[in-house]
Image: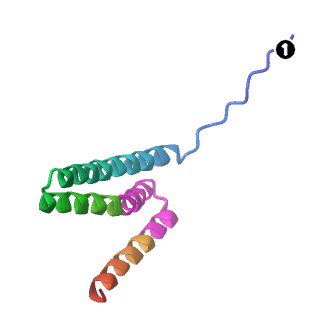
Amino acid sequence: MSTHEPDIHPASPHEPIEITLARLLRIGSFIAAVLIAAGIGTMLLGKEAAATRLITAGLLALLATPIMRVIAAGLIFIREKDWRFACFCLVVICSLAAGIYLGQTHG
């Protein structure tokens, strides 16, 4: 009778990063959902001006969530001195900023 213990793999060094980023996405999505639901509820009560503001805030929160994820990942990579991935995050942030800027000037 042999007792075979399962192989225990060491935790991935990026596991805390993944957990942090997943939590950030979950919180951002939850905030956006609450704002949009409140906007819809307000609209049903007949207060369209307030409803429009709440729904717009919810959509902005939804759009900002992945941007905050990239910023958080970049900060984590900088803290860990992982310069290659920190540079990738910087390129993504610059691309997003350029897209937002160009979208405003041409819209």
Q: Residue furthest top?
A: 1
Magenta segment, prevailing SS (helix, strand or loop)? helix
Q: Quadrant of residue 98?
A: bottom left
Residue 23 image point, x, y percent: 40, 45
Q: Residue at x 68, y 30 (%)?
A: 8
Q: How dense is the environment of label 1, judged by Cα within 10 Å: few (below 14), some, or many (20 and up)? A: few
Comparing 62 with 45, the one in front is 45
| Residues in magenta, as a range | 65-89
Q: Quadrant of the N terminus?
A: top right
Badge 1 element = loop
What type is the residue that disc 1 sits on?
A: Ser
**Vertical placement of residue 92 versus 21, above or below:** below
Report x, y in % for residue 57.
23, 60
Report if residue 85 lies within the magenta region.
Answer: yes
Q: Which quarter of the figure is the C terminus placed in? A: bottom left
Return the residue at label 1: 2
Give the left or right position of residue 88, taking residue 100 as reference: right
Whether the magenta-drawn stretch holds residue 43 is answered as no
Q: Nearer the viewer, residue 50 or 93?
A: 50
Q: Position of residue 104 (x, y in %)?
A: 28, 83
- Give the side of residue 52 with respect to residue 105, left or right: left
Residue 3 located left or right of residue 27: right
- Residue at 38 percent of width and 76 percent of height: 94
Q: Residue at x 58, y 43 (%)?
A: 12
Residue 43, position as x, y percentages in the image: 19, 55
Q: Answer left or right for 77 relative to 11.
A: left
Q: Nearer the viewer, residue 65 or 41?
A: 41
Image quadrant assignment for residue 69: bottom left
What residue appears at the point 32 percent right and 50 percent down from the top-left corner? 33
Q: Nearer the viewer, residue 28 or 47?
A: 47
Colour mode? rainbow
